[in-house]
Amino acid sequence: MNEGSSRLLDTINSPDDLKKIDSEFLPQVCNELREFIIDALSCNPGHFGASLGVVELTVALHYVFNTPYDKIIWDVGHQAYGHKILTGRRDRFYTNRKFKGLSGFPNIFESEYDAFGVGHSSTSISAGVGIATAASMRGDDQQQVVAIIGDGAMTAGMAFEGLNNMSALKSNMTVILNDNNMAIDPNVGGFSEYLVDIATSGTYNKLRSEAFKALEKMKLAGPRSKEMITKLNNSLKNLLTKQTNIFEGLNIRYFGPVDGHDVQHLTRVLSDLKNIKGPKVLHVITKKGKGFKFAEENQTAWHAVGDKFDKLTGELLKSNTSSVPKPPKFQDVFGQTIVELAEKNEKIVGITPAMPSGCSLNIMMEKMPDRAFDVGIAEQHAVTFSAGLAIAGYVPFCNIYSSFMQRSFDQVIHDVALQKLNVVFCLDRGGLVGADGATHHGVYDLSFFRGVPNLVVSSPMDEIELRNLMYTAQLPDKGPFSIRYPRGIGSNIDWQQPMTEIKIGTGRKLKDGKDLAVLSIGPVGVKAGQVIAKIERDNLTIAHYDMRFVKPLDEALLHEVFQKHKRIVTIEDGTVVGGLGSAVLEFMADNGYRARVKRLGVPDEFIEHGTQTELYGVCGFDKEGIEKAIFELLES
């Protein structure tokens, strides 16, 4: 195809179609792909800046490599929209992140081009090493494996574990380090600064290239001389930048940095790398939000847009423009409350693994920069770092999204709970989160934390209760303490009430009743209360209890419930396996009670993406599902 006047993107339904286009027209393909992404997301919001930043890289990868035989693994997957569009999903892209539509992340069940399912950071190198090792074991020396990882994701320990093993196994694969100095918020830490040093060392890269050419001419660049060449390169890097290249220090060939927005140069570089066996790193410099000036200028705000927007002005088109005051987001209640507490308790510090704006710890970081820490995408470190602060007498509030807390479960047990340290875990995004889907639903924390000795496990029903639990958790001798709350807004406009201590392990009876008892935990209790108010009649009364804690359980309250009621509904925005409902059944069995108990919550399966309301319906604990469960139990 030689003409550049028609719309080339419309002719591309697979990477094979892309390969038919002359390389001189690839910049046009990139421009059209970028415009398509902007158009689509202006009407159907989603992750934005990351995909714009890798348009040229995406086109170059699919132009050079033979996918799906060659494997391209996107780390996290925020940046994979262009990849989806070029691999046969352009016509369905309008369904992205919608219920029953395309996933917002690469998904092996969605397309053969999605080589590995992702959603959490820093997994691509390890997965790539596994795939490359499998190719080697079956004698396939032609398959190419490419892992694309951002400089933010490279701050996680798992990425370094993968690099170390890639070096040890001499894996035939390429790691592309997409360096834009951003994760969601700006990257922090020594590694980010280190990449800047490499990127600015043009002298090193020029001399390195000339040294290799000279060695090749002298026929000194054969397999036996690999170790000697690596040492020479390390010495050269050390001489010019006064530090060793960490990749080449691991015997991984390092190439770059190169301009990540020059698609033609990228195709030439990638074509050359295909012919070099063994582990390799290509360092690519990109700009997050490239091609949309509003995203380039405010990369954090445009990482993911939650509203439709005007693509010409950048104006967000708010779906709800009502002037009626709304309750705050739970994350903002946390952000404001930790500052209030820290102003009175000088021992309080805040910690987040790379999500300061997402969890609103940025409020504390702005007001108390010496007492709030962003440790990078490193949940395991965040927990043990908090343990170190606690053992030294501080009270760390470690804020981690529920689905990411899974990654640091060992540290919670070994470094915090075992030592009875007063670390307060604030788990944002607890429950079903919506369009991000199965990789991001925070539905397991109540269950997996219930089995940890010494750990208090709680969930507030509203913003006032969140503040009271945070106040309680920072008081002396409270030990390890978990507080989980959901994504989105609460239910109280007048939420900034004076904080009071809550006795650990106590629930509360919200209303009495004689026909059935509803036991809820967390904000789903607000919804349950609305349902109860709707369906009660003169001859029907329903008791409602807010449990607040799944560990320790309020046993006195449960004795009251089982002594008065033979029909009980438990409701939780979490998995029914091992959660509140399981705890209630265990209590019933241990104490010899008999009752009919209906558990509502997330079933024992992975829940897809959609709006939170849609997913509550799928799981059966939306308002209609709660009402149905109550009547079914009453009629049984």
Image (tube, rainbow, N blue to C red):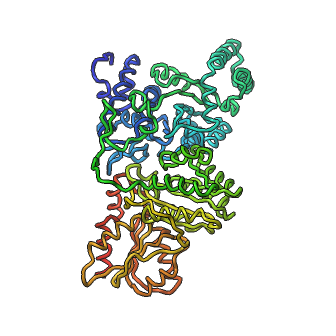
When the figure is inspected, residue 617 is found, relative to residue 193, above or below; the finding is below
When the figure is inspected, residue 280 is found, relative to residue 389, above or below; the finding is above
Which residue is at the front of the view, 40 or 137? Answer: 40
Assign the C terminus to one quadrant of the image: bottom left
Say how many tags the image has.
Answer: 0
Q: Quadrant of residue 501?
A: bottom right
Q: Tell me if residue 234 can be seen.
A: yes
Q: Quadrant of residue 567?
A: bottom left
Residue beneath the point at 70% across and 20% down: 240
Residue beneath the point at 45% across and 22% down: 263
Residue beneath the point at 64% across and 31% down: 194
Residue beneath the point at 55% across and 40% down: 153
In-image side of 541 versus 61 (left or right): left
Residue 98, percent across and down?
32, 48
Assign the N terminus to one quadrant of the image: top left
Residue 112, percent across and down?
41, 41
Residue 257, percent across and down?
57, 24
In-image side of 113 versus 247 (left or right): left
Q: Tell me if residue 410 can be seen.
A: no
When the figure is inspected, residue 467 is found, relative to residue 517, above or below; the finding is above
Residue 200, percent across and down?
61, 22
